[in-house]
Image: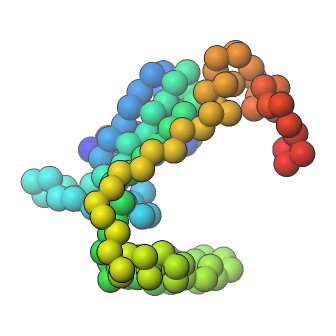
Amino acid sequence: VSDLCCATALASHLRNHVFVDCPIIQAALSLIEIYEDDAVAKRAELYIAGNEIANGYYELTDPAEQSRRFAHDQARREQLNRPAIPKDEALLETLTAGLPESYGVALGVDRLLKIVTQSKTLAECMTFTGHL
């Protein structure tokens, strides 16, 4: 397991890296697997030229485990005096109905375009700016 995985602060130093099996603190909606005595989040992140371009993970499909994680996250938010976030009941209902095993990857097309065009900021390569 790499301590660098999911480390946004180090992103500018990362060139063409793929990280897999992140620390479990980064599990969120992903499976957790045990390798020898080490628990890892089944996640991956792709960095190109110091930018996170894509990330993905094996979907957690256990509704009881997901509900526990929501409760844990909520308790942590309370400790940090952050506003509560409603539990995603639609997700829990979907998991209860039976979500097949799957892996999802999100590619930041805007981030990839920034690298391809050698722009310094995302705003420089966007064709729309209403939300920036």
**Residue at left 58%, top 30%?**
51
Whole-percent x and y of residue 30?
Answer: 37, 60
Whole-percent x and y of residue 76?
Answer: 51, 78
**Residue at left 10%, top 54%?**
36
Is residue 95 depicted above or below 126 in this figure?
below
Count of marks, rendered view: 0
**Residue at left 36%, top 80%?**
97
Of residues 50 and 111, the one nearer the viewer is 111
Whole-percent x and y of residue 78?
Answer: 58, 83
Res 116 → quadrant: top right
Drawn side of residue 10 relative to residue 82, left or right = left
Drawn side of residue 48 relative to residue 21, left or right = right
Task: Please identify the quadrant where the N terminus is shown.
Answer: top left
Is residue 79 depicted above or below 50 in this figure?
below
**Residue at left 62%, top 79%?**
85
Whole-percent x and y of residue 64?
Answer: 32, 83
Which residue is most to the left? 36
Res 72 → quadrant: bottom left
